[in-house]
Amino acid sequence: MEKIGSATRIVPITWDEAKEEIVWLDNTQIPWKEVYSSTKDLGRLIRAIQKLEIRGAPILGEAGAYGTAMIANNSVNSNSDILKNITEQGKQLAEARPTAVNLSWGVKVIQELVFAAIKNGKTPSEVKEEAISTAKKIQQSNINATYEIGRHGKKLINDGDVLVTVCNAGTLACDGLGTATAPLRAAWSDGIRFKVLATYTAPLYQGARLTAWELHKDSIPVQVITDNMAGHIMREEKATAVWAGADRILAARTKECGTIYNKIGTFGLAMMAKELNMKTYVAAPTSTFDILHNVESVRIEQRRPEEVETLLGGTTVVPKGVGVLNPAFDRTPPEYVSAIVTELGVVQAPYSASIPRLLKTPGSMVKL
Ligand code: MRU
């Protein structure tokens, strides 16, 4: 596959064959250091996910798949032990973070594969091998999906555009070209010239630390702005579109179809974009679509107050005794979303018709 940009040569997560463990690039250390960590211990993997060493919806899907394969691989050589462990420990892994649907999706794909392999009389060694090779295939299909998202989404980008990003939906979060960054990278490599305004994304600064780092590495012009500058700067700079990823996209055929769950701040940017006659584009693989839940049943992760009380764990900025709120994600209703770019193509409103049609397309990662 063609390499576009140097950041796309990063390997955010992988399986170490020799050590039989998961290896990942620790997102909490970027942009200061590129540090890889590894483990074969489920507790450590769950902590890495909860601390956001491993993060971003599609990478969480890969971590779910590799993690479940690791659980099978760690089991003694008996199918009943594998079955028990991937059921019980797989549940713990799937629940490590609640909002990105990809994590439980990745766990479920491997669990179902293992159940079927055992039913078909495979030996424990064969079951373990199949689980690991399927996790690798999931990673490869995620990477391929980002290239397809790039190919479809670049048509929405024009010379002179000013594009606003939120959080990090790049290689670090999604593998390959990233999701929201894929159309940008593909358009840039085709010679389309634009600039990017990356919003800080407080309190953990994934926009400043990670998206700016990735785009700068790829020589795509990027300026970082704080979250509260967005409205003013979008109007003054005549921004043309917001590009966001997604942690979950509601896909049941109801009026909520096309509702986007993404990093806190996305809803505000989409509202401002609508007011300023800008577009809001969301890019995500079909593994991010959720046909089972609705607005009532999706849980938005509430994170530790310390993340808001202190600047990246350092200086305290909130007076002692004052409360804080820290929802990690928000919900953007479909009427704010101009288009959703997936590996299978671009869909637009009415989403309750276009999304179910998309998910029936061969190659969809959603099992209907
Ligand atoms: O809390 P994070 O850093 O895991 O949140 C990630 C995001 O919200 C991304 O924008 C999202 O996963 C979409 S694509 C990676």
Image: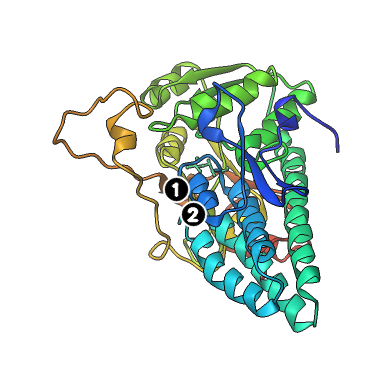
Residue found farthest to the left: 321
- Of residues 100 and 186, which is closer to you in this image? 100
Determine the residue positioned at 60% across, 30% down.
35
Crowdedness near tag 2: few (<14), some (14–19) or many (≥20) residues, C-alpha within 10 Å: many
Q: Which of marks 1 and 2 is nearer the N terminus?
A: 2
* Front-lying residue, 164 or 50: 50
Instruction: Kindly identify which residue carries mark 1.
Output: 332
The residue at which mark 2 appears reads as 259
- On the image, which quarter does residue 220 sit in? top right
Residue 116 on image: x %, y %:
73, 78
Q: Give above or below for 300 relative to 78.
A: above
User: 211 above or below 116?
Assistant: above
Pinpoint residue 213: horizontal percent, then vertical percent.
59, 22
Q: Which residue is drawn at 53% across and 60% down?
A: 93
Query: Residue 189 lies in what quarter of the image?
Result: top right
Query: Could you tell whether 284 is left or right of 47 in the image?
Result: right
With 282 as the anchor, is 141 left or right in this view?
A: right
- Counting every numbered tag in the picture gives 2
